[in-house]
Structures are given as structure tokens and as C-alpha cells.
Amino acid sequence: KLKQTLKTDANGEAKTSFTAKNLQRWSPTSPKLYQVKVATAKDQVAEQIGFRNVWVKGEDIFLNDKPIFLKSISFHEEIPQRKGRAFSEADAVMLLSEAKALGCNMIRLAHYPQNEYIVRMAEKMGFLLWEEIPIWQGIDFKNEATKEKAGKMMAEMVMRDKNRCALTFWGVANETQPSEPRNAFIRHLIETTKSIDTTRLLTAAFDLVRFNRDRQVFVMDDPFIKELDVVAVNKYMGWYHPWPISPEKATWDVAKGQPLIVSEFGGEALYGKTGDADLVSSWSEDYQATLYRENLEMFKHIPNLRGTSPWVLFDFRSPFRFHPTNQEDWNRKGLVSDQGYRKKAWYLMKEYYDGK
């Protein structure tokens, strides 16, 4: 226990530094947090903080001096069982407990900053966090007002959570197309972020991986990846993209020399529906399970793979999902149904993460 008495200057500020012996660092397996209190004669503020180190070397991500594989999942800030937003501490516990049961050590908070209950509870429960703003696909990258607004959003997110030890990644974009206006736009976000916080890893999710038939490998052409600490890829093999080669032969040559995360993969299934395990149009749990098996097989052949994050934990409401029988305004890619029931693919992902 450390205690210091400080005196404020003319601006009402006081600074101090000290050395703490035998400091226990925060990690997913041991999410140690320390209590900090700042008090005056008439008021006091209490906070919990944690300490940890994270960095990249070559194709590896290190946490507290040890390489780590990111066992992630994404979820929206909503409770599907009641068709409403997640807004309370109890809601945060529900979402994060399901991720914990799956064996996750990281959450990708897609695709926007989620409420502080989720961030703080994730820290207490031992989850690394990837936080991002909604820079996705159809953004007008040439519009200066849009760029400035995005920069403000980024700054507000970083300012809010820069002292949360769970925060590991700042995400600056999702599924964008290469162009000079886009590059300038994202650089502005990176510069804005670094002006506030230089201690987190910068990433973005791309969806331009393609199969090179001459080389018989998956490749990606986007030079901007060199400006990021960690490269992430969204690729829906077996759902939006048919297999050009069998999964056991599906090798990747993407972001060589950098850590790579498969930040989205998966497919839709209606809970309780059975059908042809090899037919994508069956919308069955059986096909979704096949799809997961095949993707997990492919992951064995990505040499710099340092994390995966299936899309998505729960089925969620979406006005763009029109199928009258299988969707009815729901995105059915969840590993868990809108009623909270685990689909067959959940158990495959659980086994994969337990083995990591």
C-alpha cells in the first residue's frame, strides 16, 4: 500500500511518480486490478487500474513478455432475447459470461465504442479489448467534414478508454477499398490516435483476400497494411465465397512478417434447423458446423495467424436480412441464437479455443 500527500500548483494540478515493488501485471488469466484513491478534505475519487505490457515483434504479439494467441469473439451492444440495447452492468455480465464460456481472451467491440459497463467489466473478467469507430465500406473518404468528424470520434474513444488496461487494439477501419483518399483518411485517424496514446496496437480489418490461382495461395494486395501494427482480415469462406481449393490445401501468403488476425468468418444458421451438412442454402446448424470445421482446418495453413474472431457471438437484429423464413430481420451468423441457445458451431469453436 502506497500513500502520498501532494500539493496542487496555481493551475490546481499535482504530479508525482514512484516505484512499486512486486507489481502484479494484469492478464486474461490473472486480471489483477489495483485500487487508487485521490482525496481532499471534502471529496474523493476512487478508481481501479491495471498494469500490463503489449507489443509486436515480427509475426508475434506479446503480452507481459510472452507471445499470445488471441481467442476473440465479436458482439453487438444488444441483448437479443429482449430485442434491445445492452445498457447495464447486468447486460455486460451476460454478454461477457457467454464469451468466457466459449474460451475467449479477447472481445472485438464491433463496430463502435460500446458502453463503459462492458469495457470495465471486460477488464475485471480478463478480456483484452479491440475497440473501433464505424469506418466501414461506403464512407466518403474525399469529404473533409467526414474526415474531421471521424477524427473527433476517434479522439473521444481514445480519451475515454486510454487508461483501461484491457484496451489492446485501436481499430481504425473495417472493410475499406484501397485509394489515396482512403489512405489519407485513415492516416488522419492514426495520427489523431497517436497524439493521445502511443501504447496500444493499431489495426484495421480488410476484406480483400483473394485466391491466386497461379500460385495456389490466398493473397491480399493493399500496401496500407505496412502502416499497421497488426493486420486483420474478414473472410467468409464457405458462405459468401466458395472454396477454390480444399480447406486442407488452402495456404495463405498475407501480411508476411506481421501478425495476422482473422477478424471475421462464419455463416448463418437458424437454431434448431437440421439439413444437408454440405449445402449452403440449407441454413442449417449442420452446414454452419461444416463451415466452421473447414475454416478451422484452413487456419492451420496461415503461418502468421495470431488470433481469430468469429462473426458473431449472438444472432442480432438487422433490417437488411430479408429471408422470410430463416432471417426475418435477424442476422443468423451467431454462435448463440437470439433466445440464448448454443448452436453446433459453438462447440467446435469452444474445442478450438480450449486447445490454444
Image: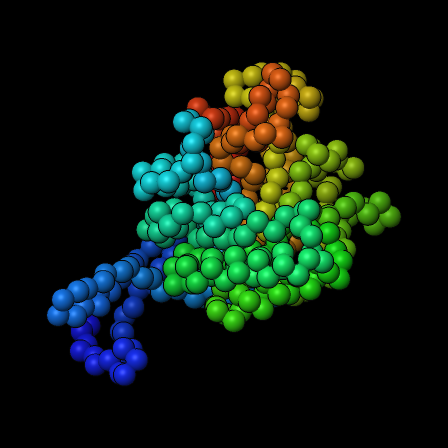
Q: Is 254 rendered above or below residue 299?
A: below
For the residue pair 49 and 133, the one nearer the viewer reads as 133
Q: Single out the residue that lies furthest toward the bottom.
A: 10
Q: Is 285 rendered above or below residue 213?
A: above
The residue lying at 28 percent from left, 59 percent from top is 48
The residue lying at 60 percent from left, 43 percent from top is 264
Horizontally, residue 321 falls left or right of residue 243, namely left
Quarter of the figure with residue 52:
bottom left
State the image coordinates of residue 43 (x, y, percent, origin top left). 17, 65
For the residue pair 29 and 73, the one nearer the viewer reads as 73
Horizontally, residue 292 falls left or right of residue 249, namely left
The residue lying at 18 percent from left, 68 percent from top is 39
Q: Quadrant of the N terminus?
A: bottom left
State the image coordinates of residue 210 (x, y, percent, origin top left). 77, 46
Q: Is 18 rendered above or below residue 88?
A: below
The residue lying at 36 percent from left, 65 percent from top is 51
Horizontally, residue 1 falls left or right of residue 194, namely left
Quarter of the figure with residue 237:
top right
Q: How many marks?
A: 0
State the image coordinates of residue 149 (x, y, percent, origin top left). 57, 58
State the image coordinates of residue 12 (x, y, percent, origin top left). 27, 77
Horizontally, residue 318 falls left or right of residue 15, namely right
* Residue 69 visible in the shown view: no
* Residue 8 visible in the shown view: yes
Q: Single out the residue that lies furthest toward the right.
A: 214
For the residue pair 115 and 258, the one nearer the viewer reads as 115
